[in-house]
Image (cartoon, helix red, strand yellow):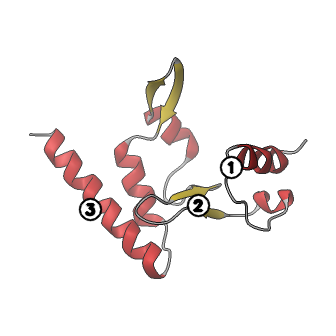
Amino acid sequence: MTNGERLLSAFENLGLEVPDIRPEEFSSNLILSFGFEPDAVDILNYTPGIEFETVYKNSITVDFSGLNIPMIDIRDLIRNKEALNREGEKALLDKYDAEVLKKIIQKMNR
């Protein structure tokens, strides 16, 4: 089973409505959006503006019901949001998200 097949299977197991997509399409840059704002979730298989190795090194580990999950550092997430260069409403949301995340950092540094 390929990684694309595994992802599609996982999405279906989670009850997500999967768009008409073939497993081999995961080998190109892809953004999948699920749900509606403000509760939408975007899944990207690439990381504009950041390198995986750096992000992984900077990540923090969060315990979620006994499962340790690496989470992206807020500064790397801001760099990613600013580099997405999406269009329309998504661009506005990315800009808004980056500004909110910057305000969180400011509050943390007080």
Q: Quadrant of the N terminus?
A: top right
Question: Which circle, 1 or 3, is nearer the viewer?
Answer: 1
Q: CA distance from mark 3 to mark 2?
A: 23 Å
Hey, what amino acid is under mark 3?
Answer: Glu
Secondary structure under tag 1 reads loop
Residue at point 48%, 73% (across, down): 85
Q: Residue at x 8, y 40 (%)?
A: 110
Residue that badge 2 annotates? 34
Against 10, residue 80 (above or below) is below
**Horizontal and vertical percent position of residue 25:** 80, 63
Furthest toward the top, the residue is 66
Residue with the most extreme left position: 110
Q: Earlier in the sequence, mark 1 or mark 3?
A: 1
Q: Position of residue 51 (x, y in %)?
A: 54, 48
Quarter of the view holding residue 30: bottom right
Q: Residue furthest bottom?
A: 88
**Crowding near pointer 2: few (<14 within 10 Å), some, many (20+)?**
some
Looking at the image, residue 110 lies above or below residue 70: below
Query: How many numbered circles are shown?
Result: 3
Q: Quadrant of residue 81?
A: bottom left
Is there CB contact under 8 Å for labels 3 and 2? no
Looking at the image, the residue that sits furthest to the front is 15
Which tag, 3 or 2, sits closer to the chain's start?
Answer: 2
Which residue is the site of mark 1? Answer: 15
Rendering coords of residue 8 (x, y %): 78, 51
Q: Which residue is mark 3?
A: 99
Q: CA distance from mark 1 to mark 3?
A: 32 Å
Residue 40's tag is none
Name the residue nearer the viewer: 9 or 106.
Answer: 9
Picture coordinates of residue 96, whole percent (x, y): 31, 67
Q: Is residue 67 left or right of residue 4?
A: left
- The nearer-to-camera label among 3 and 2 is 2
